[in-house]
Image (cartoon, helix red, strand yellow):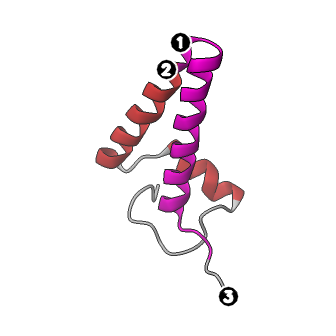
Amino acid sequence: MKTPMSLDRAIMAFAGVMTLVSVALTQLVSPWWWLLTAFVGLNLLQSAFTGFCPAGMVMKRMGIGQGADGASCRR
């Protein structure tokens, strides 16, 4: 039986998807979508130093990332 994805891995997957989507939107719609890429990157950077992760809080409430205990985003 497969174990559920950890919260840290779910956050990394979400950040990767958001980055790829913003790059595609930048190419197809408007260069202003680079701001989404910057926001995702800055959020990951501050989360690495502070442990505060809004996406992690939302995912926990949704029941995502109930696997192995993650090292960050515990708040």
Instruction: Name the kind of residue labelled 3 in the image.
Output: Met
Q: Which of marks 1 and 3 is in front?
A: 1
**Disc 3 to disc 2: CB gap under 8 Å:** no
Residue pushed farthest left? 49
What is the total number of numbered labels drawn onto the structure image? 3
Q: Where is residue 3 in the image (x, y as percent from the top left)?
A: 61, 80
Cα distance between the residues tagged 2 and 1: 6 Å
Q: Is 24 drawn above or below residue 70 in the view shown?
A: above
At mark 3, the secondary structure is loop
Q: Name the residue under label 3.
A: 1
Magenta part of the protein: which range?
4-33
57 or 68: nearer the eye? 68
- Quick check: 71 left or right of 31? left
The image quadrant of residue 62 is bottom right
Q: Position of residue 37 (x, y in %)?
A: 48, 28
14 or 23: nearer the eye? 23
Q: Name the residue under label 1.
A: 31
Label 3 environment density (alpha carbons within 10 Å; few <14, some 14–19, many ≥20): few
Q: Where is residue 47 in the image (x, y as percent from the top left)?
A: 38, 45
Q: Earlier in the sequence, mark 3 or mark 2?
A: 3
**Disc 2 to disc 1: CB gap under 8 Å:** yes
Cα distance between the residues tagged 3 and 2: 40 Å
Q: Mark 2 points at which residue?
A: 34
